[in-house]
Image (tube, coloured by chain):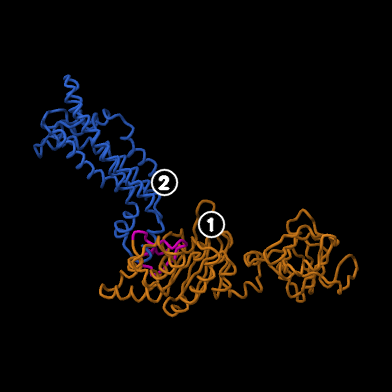
Amino acid sequence: MLSVDIHKRLGDFRLDVAFSAEDGILALLGASGCGKSLTLRCIAGIERPDSGRIELNGRVLFDSERGINLPPQKRRVGYLFQHYSLFPNMTVAQNIMQGARLRPKGERRAAVSAMIASMRLDGLAEHRPSELSGGQRQRVALARCLIAEPEALLLDEPFSALDDYLKWQLELELTDTLGAYAGKVGTTLFVSHDRGEVYRLAESVCTLTRGSGNGVQPVRELFAEPDTLAKCLISGCKNFSRARPLGGNLVEAVDWGVTLDAGREVTIDVAYVGVRAHYLSIDNGQLTMDNYGGRTTGNLVRCTVERVIDDVFSAVVMLRTSGDASSEMSRLRMELPKAEWDGFYSADSPREIDISIDAKDIMLLKE
Amino acid sequence: MDWYPLFNSLRVAAISTAFTFFLGLLAAHVVSRAPRLVRGALDVVLTLPLVLPPTVIGFFLLKLFGPYGPVGSIFEKWFETRLVMRWYSAIFASVVVAFPLMYRTTCGAFRAYDRDLRSAGQTLGLSNTYIFWRVTLPCCKQGIIAGSILAFARALGEYGATSMVAGYTPGRTATISTTVYQLWRTGDDAGAYTWVAINIAISAVVLIALNFFEKNEKRGGI
C-alpha cells in the first residue's frame, strides 16, 4: 500500500498529486510534461517535494510537517529508469550485483546467478550493457531492481526507448515478470503516455493533467465512462462539444449544432459531451430525417466532408458540422475501416453526409 | 651535462599534478552540486588563474608565502621553513596555474555524465561515496585523465610564476624553462638549444598521450 500526497513547484509548473495505490499495478497516465516522471522521482527520493506526505506499507518516506525525508537508499523503492541507466563500466553480473549489496555477503553470488537464470540472461553475465539489445537491457535493469527486494516498483515509461516491433514483445515479457513477482513487490507504479499500454498492463489508473492528479479509478472504467473532460481527453477521445442540458434525456451539443438523445437522464452539471472517433457511423439512409424545427432525431448529425486522411488500416474522415465554424470543437473526426469508407464514398459523391451517434456512445462529461 | 633541471621539472610537474588531480576533482564535484548562483561565482574564481598573467599569480604567491606573508611567516616561525626560493616553491606556482585545466575538463565530464546513473545507484541502496568512486569516476574517466595530462603539461611548461616564487639557482631550483631563459641570457645558445629540444620532446609525448585518450573516449561511449 503506497499513499502519496505531494506538492511541488518548479518555475511555472505546479505538481499536485494525491493517490493511494493498493497492491497491484497502478498506471499514471498523462501527456508528456504533465509531471508523471516527477511524481515517481519524488516517491523514490530523487527529488524532494515542497510539501506533502509519502507513506509505503506504514513507513513514512516523506513528511514535510514532521521533517521526515528518507534518502533513496532507505526507501526500498525500485526504480526502472526510462533508458534503464545500467552502469556502463560494469558487466551484466556486476550491474545486478549492485542491487544485492544489502544482502549478506555469502548469499550475493547465488542470488545474482538465480536472478540471471530467471531473467533469461544466461550467457550474457560477462557482457557490458553496450553489447546488449534493448530488450536485454530492460531485463538487466529489472533484475537489478528486483534483486534488491523493493516494497514498491516504479516503472518510468518502460517501453518508450524501444521501436514498435520490440515493444510488443517486451510488453508480454514484462507482464510475465511482474506476474511472477506479484506476491513479492507490493505496489507497482507504471508511468506511461500510451493509452493502449495502460489498458493492457494496469489494473487501475490515475490520470494527470498539467501536474494535477484526477484520482484513481479502475482502468476499464476510465475508458468506458470517463466523467470529466480532462479524463476523457486523456482516454483518447477526439470529439467534444460544449453541452446544454435540456431536461430529461435531451442535451444540446452546442458546437455541433444538434440536439442529442442520450438515452439516459442528462443531469444539470453536464458541461460537455464526447463521442469516440471509432463510434461515429455513417447513416445508411434507413433512419428518417424528421424535420421539426430544424432538429434531427435519431441522433443524426449533418456534416460536410472536409478531408479524408488515409491511415494504414483505416480512413480518418474530418467532418464539419453545422455548428459555429470558428470553434475548434465544431469539427468531428471519424475513423472507420478503409474498405467501409471506400465502399460508401467516392470522389463524385455529395460532400454532405449524415452521421449517426448511438445514444450509448455519448459520454456525458462534467467540467 | 647537468641533468638537474630535467629531474627537477619532472618532479615538480608530477607532484603538482597529483595535488591538482584531487583539488580539481573535489572542486568540480562541489561546484557541480552547488546552487546555480554559487556555481557561477565559484566557476569564475576557480578559472581565474587560467586567464591571469603568471606574473600576477607569482605576485600573489610571494605576498602569501613570502617570509613576511600571512602563510610564510607562520612557517618561518613554527617550522623554521622557508616556502619561497626552494625547489618545492615551484609546486605552489604550478598547482595554481594548472588547476583550472583539471577543474574545467572534469566539470565538462561531470556535466556530460548521466545523472540518472547516480539516482539508480541510490535507489539500489548504494552509498553516495561508493557511487562516486565506483560509478561516477569510472564513467568520467576519460575526461579526468585528459584533464590530468593537460595539467601535467601546463605544470611542466610553467615559467612566469615559478621564476618569481622559486627563482633560479642552478642545482637547486632550476627547471627546464628557467634554465632556457638563463642560458639564453648568458649567450649560451648551444645549451639553450639542448633544453629546448628536450622540452619539445617531452611535450610531444604528452600531447600524443592526450590524443590517444581523447580518441578512446569517442569509442568508449555506451
In space, the residues marked 2 and 1 are separated at their CA atoms by 21 Å
Disc 2 on helix, strand or loop? helix
**Where does the image place residue A182, in percent across and percent down from the top left?**
45, 78
Nearest the viewer among A294 and A335 is: A335
Disc 1 on helix, strand or loop? strand
Q: Tell me: A237 left or right of A202.
A: right
- For the point 50% across and 53% down, the residue is A10
In the rendered view of the protein, which quadrant contains the C terminus of chain A?
bottom right
Region rendered in magenta: A65-89
Whether residues under marks 2 and 1 lie with C-beta atoms below 8 angstroms apart, the answer is: no
Question: Is A86 contained in the magenta span?
Answer: yes
Nearest the viewer among B116 and B212 is: B212
Question: Is B21 contained in the magenta span?
Answer: no
Nearest the viewer among B50 and B84 is: B50
State whether residue A113 is above or below residue A319: below
Q: Colour of chain A?
A: orange
- Subunit that carries the residue with mark 1: A
Residue occupying the far top of the picture: B187
**Where does the image place residue A169, in percent across and percent down from the top left?**
52, 71
Numbered label tally:
2
- Subunit that carries the residue with mark 2: B
Q: Colour of chain B?
A: blue
At label 2, the amino acid type is Arg
Q: Tell me: B131 left or right of A32.
A: left
At label 1, the amino acid type is Arg
**Where does the image place residue A319, in percent across and percent down from the top left?**
77, 61
Residue annotated with mark 2: B36
Which quadrant of the view contains residue B45? top left
Q: Residues within 10 Å of mark 2 (few under 14, many from 20)?
A: few
Which quadrant of the view contains residue B52? top left
Which quadrant of the view contains residue B122? bottom left
Residue annotated with mark 1: A14
